[in-house]
């Protein structure tokens, strides 16, 4: 789980640098981290961005991994996300 989290959050500056929509990506990451949003609601919110069932299953698995984390861990992930979005590379977008 921690490896998935690190890899996902490491990719954030690349998305921001490419200008692919940091706001949209930020919203999806916020929903992923949100412990009050269950997996079904999460998938319903991002359904339009999921090209197929395999991708939907992967995002469901990812959300369930976050749901099994403590609030302290989720707060640290949110802090990391904010640090990345405030970085030089994302600040341009």
Image (cartoon, grey):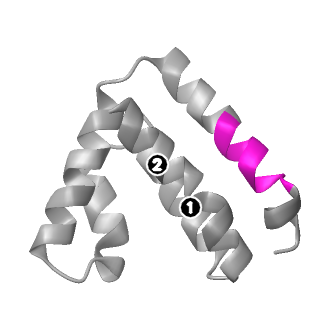
Taking depth in this image into account, of 64 and 20 the one nearest to the observer is 20
Q: Can residue 78 be seen here?
A: yes
**Residue 14, image quadrant:** bottom right
Which stretch is magenta? 80-87
Q: Residues within 10 Å of mark 1 (few under 14, many from 20)?
A: few
- Mark 1 lies on a secondary structure that is helix
| Cα gap from disc 1 to disc 2, whole angstroms | 18 Å
- Mark 2 lies on a secondary structure that is helix
Q: How many marks?
A: 2
Evaluate if marks 1 and 2 touch, with contact meaning CB atoms under 8 Å apart.
no
**Which residue is at 12% across, 69% downward?**
54
Residue 70 is left or right of residue 16, and the answer is left
Between marks 1 and 2 in the image, the one whose residue lies nearer the viewer: 2
In the picture, the quarter occupied by the N terminus is top left
Is 75 magenta? The answer is: no
Give the number of the disc on residue 7.
2
Mark 1 = which residue?
27
Mark 1 and mark 2 lie on one chain; the one further toward the N terminus is: 2
**Which residue is at 81% across, 75% downward?**
93
Q: Main secondary structure of the magenta part?
A: helix
Considering every residue shown, the one lying at the far left of the view is 53
């Amino acid at each position: 789980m921690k490896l998935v989290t690190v890899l996902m959050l490491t990719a954030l500056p690349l998305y921001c640098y490419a200008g692919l929509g940091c706001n949209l990506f930020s919203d999806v990451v916020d929903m992923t981290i949100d412990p009050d949003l269950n997996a079904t609601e999460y998938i319903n919110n991002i359904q339009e961005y999921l090209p197929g069932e395999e991708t939907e299953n992967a995002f469901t698995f990812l959300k369930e991994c976050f749901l099994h984390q403590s609030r302290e861990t989720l707060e640290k992930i949110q802090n990391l996300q904010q640090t990345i979005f405030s970085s030089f590379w994302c600040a341009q977008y």
